[in-house]
Image (cartoon, rainbow, N blue to C red):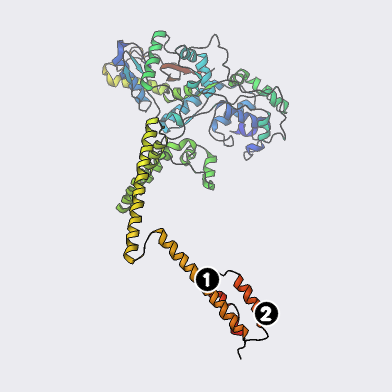
């Protein structure tokens, strides 16, 4: 540790990793992303990381394969013991599968299509990474910059064997039986089958304590839960839900059951509608529909006739003829009466005005004009002559 | 080693016993299912495959770093790591890696000793005998043993190097 402090931390144990030499920062980046991968950032290196970083920074040769092997073994043991979900060295393992003829064997048996393998590539560390790390101010891309490749590497001639069984017949039997027993390796759809199975993950602001514990890494980070802990979260969510249901009253359960029934009915109605809308019109169906429409029209006509007959009967009982001729006669009589009333009113008004000598001429002419205009309301026309204002005496 | 993942019918019973002993030695639930005259190694991890995260190593563009005033060539050359970095820019077979991982187990010295103990428990007459006499292979180095789509594989430090 003293040497690590002297070489990497510039002799000061309290030196922050952001303040170490840029090339050492880059080496640490390589360590966490290319050799001994770990979750989280590179701000909290483990003892292994510190040791390897010291050797790399001081130009001392180190047996990296041993460290990588050790790291893989640790990750496997952690996966078995504490269900650690991170698989390190994905690319290295894939290369071993390729060089060790595993991929070829699977391809020979038709079990290594791109769909099954789900090929991915890592993100390249280049000048842009330096910009993100604030080692340089601006990254200028170049046409010769490395691009991600999915092309398999050339096979080595002296690569040690990884397959424990080389007999092609046995291998084909094994692969066939494996497929039969476990099914194909499926490209898994990440969306849950049922909404109740996995809860919606709502992003929320992290508390200071959470942020602190995540920064420290290790087991505490797992306990806080992240994307990979979704199934665990689902289990805890389901158990909490169950507890809530258990504690709720019987009435609530009944209400819930009713609500479910109603919901089911609504869903059924909608589905029936959907099914009906899907029906295709055939000539037979069209004929049947037109016949039905005719029947319905006839029924409505009958109903209308019955209603009219009933109304006439009621009118007759009162003494009114319900026919249309009777109504017309009544209307003519009303119009005649109104006309005679108008004439009488005009005559009376003229007589009264004649009794006043000054206004006799003017009013007489107005009266003539008024009588010439057809009035729909005789009562109004009689009262509209301002006769009340005329002095009598 | 012969009792590893599968072999012929001759010692099927013994194999079942031994494979289960390996399972118990690594303190995990291994349920070996036999079919016909072969045996497939079951999962060693109780983790759903879809929840596993495969970390893919990042390839390094040293030329781009050089163009941006970051020269690490001497540091990398001192460790002879350029071939390793060159290898990193390639395909990762996510499904194969996951299948490998859920059936993987570490066969180290501790596991080999547990293997011997289990053999002695099942057959007390083997007590005091060497590994060779017990019909077990000599333990040489730590290995990662697994099965990928039915094909048994072993990874050791030599292979990584």
* Residue at the bottom extreme, as displayed: A393
- Lower position in the chain sequence, tag 1 or tag 2: 1
| Chain letter of disc 1 in the image | A
Image marks 1 and 2: residues in contact by CB distance under 8 Å: no
Q: Residues within 10 Å of mark 1 (few under 14, many from 20)?
A: some
Q: Residues within 10 Å of mark 2 (few under 14, many from 20)?
A: few
Please state the horizontal and vertical placement of residue A348, each as a whole percent of the image: 56, 80
Residue pictured at 57% horizontal, 34% vertical: A45
Residue A194 located left or right of residue B122: right
The label number, if any, that marks residue B90 in the structure image: none
Determine whether A209 is above or below A353 in the image: above
Say whether residue A49 is visible.
yes
- Towards the viewer: B151 or A335: A335
Please state the horizontal and vertical placement of residue B33, each as a whole percent of the image: 32, 20
- Towards the viewer: B156 or A100: A100
Determine whether A125 is above or below A12 in the image: above
Determine whether B29 is above or below A175 in the image: below
- Count of numbered badges drawn on the protein: 2
Dot 1 lies on which element?
helix
Say whether residue A10 is visible.
no
Residue pictured at 46% horizontal, 41% vertical: A200
Please state the horizontal and vertical placement of residue A141, each as a whole percent of the image: 71, 28
Label 1, label 2: how many angstroms apart (C-alpha)? Answer: 24 Å
The label number, if any, that marks residue A339 in the structure image: 1
Which of the 4 image quarters holds residue B118? top left
Q: Which residue is mark 2?
A: A362
């Amino acid at each position: 540790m003293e040497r690590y402090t002297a070489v990497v931390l510039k002799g000061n144990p309290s030196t922050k990793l952001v303040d170490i030499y840029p090339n050492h920062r880059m080496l640490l980046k390589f360590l966490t992303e290319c050799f001994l991968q770990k979750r989280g950032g590179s701000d909290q290196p483990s003892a292994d990381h510190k040791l390897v970083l010291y050797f790399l920074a001081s130009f001392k040769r180190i047996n990296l394969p041993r460290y990588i092997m050790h790291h893989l073994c640790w990750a496997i043991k952690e996966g078995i013991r504490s269900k650690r979900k991170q698989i390190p060295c994905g690319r290295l393992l894939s290369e071993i599968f390729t060089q060790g003829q595993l991929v070829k064997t699977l391809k020979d048996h038709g079990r290594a299509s791109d769909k099954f393998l789900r090929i991915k590539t890592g993100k390249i560390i280049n000048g842009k990474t330096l910009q993100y790390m604030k080692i340089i101010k601006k990254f200028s891309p170049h046409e010769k910059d490395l691009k991600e490749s999915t092309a398999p590497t050339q096979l080595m001639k002296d690569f040690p064997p990884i397959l424990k069984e080389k007999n092609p017949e046995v291998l084909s039997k094994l692969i066939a039986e494996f497929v039969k027993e476990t099914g194909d390796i499926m490209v898994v759809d990440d969306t849950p089958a049922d909404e109740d199975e996995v809860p919606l993950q709502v992003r929320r602001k992290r508390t200071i304590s959470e942020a602190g514990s995540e920064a420290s890494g290790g087991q505490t980070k797992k306990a806080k839960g992240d994307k990979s802990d979704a199934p665990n979260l689902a289990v805890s969510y389901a158990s909490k839900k169950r507890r809530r249901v258990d504690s709720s009253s019987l009435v609530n359960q009944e209400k819930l059951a009713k609500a479910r029934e109603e919901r089911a009915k609504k869903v059924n109605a909608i589905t029936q509608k959907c099914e009906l809308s899907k029906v295709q019109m055939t000539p037979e169906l069209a004929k049947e529909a037109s016949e039905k429409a005719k029947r319905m029209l006839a029924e409505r006509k009958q109903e209308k006739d019955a209603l009219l007959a009933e109304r006439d009967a009621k009118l007759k009982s009162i003494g009114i003829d319900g026919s249309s001729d009777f109504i017309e006669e009544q209307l003519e009589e009303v119009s005649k009466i109104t006309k005679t009333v108008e004439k009488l009113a005009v005559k009376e008004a003229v007589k009264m005005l004649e009794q006043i000598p000054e206004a006799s001429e003017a009013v007489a002419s107005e009266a003539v004009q008024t009588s010439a205009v057809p009035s729909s309301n005789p009562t109004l026309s009689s009262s509209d002559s301002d006769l009340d204002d005329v002095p009598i005496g | 080693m012969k009792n590893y993942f599968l072999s012929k019918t001759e010692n099927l019973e013994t194999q079942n016993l031994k494979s289960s002993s390996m399972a118990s030695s690594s303190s995990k639930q291994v349920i070996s299912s036999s079919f016909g005259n072969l045996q497939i190694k079951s999962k060693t991890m109780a983790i759903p495959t879809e929840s596993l995260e495969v970390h893919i190593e990042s390839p390094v563009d040293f030329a781009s770093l050089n163009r941006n005033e970051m020269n690490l060539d001497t540091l990398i050359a001192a460790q002879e790591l350029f071939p390793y970095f060159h290898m990193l820019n390639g395909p990762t077979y996510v499904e194969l890696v996951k299948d490998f991982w859920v059936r993987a187990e570490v066969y180290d010295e501790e596991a080999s000793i547990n293997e011997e103990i289990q053999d002695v428990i099942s057959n007390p007459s083997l007590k005091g005998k060497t590994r060779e006499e017990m019909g077990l292979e000599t333990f040489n180095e730590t290995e990662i043993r697994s099965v990928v789509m039915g094909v048994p594989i072993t990874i050791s430090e030599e292979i990584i190097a």
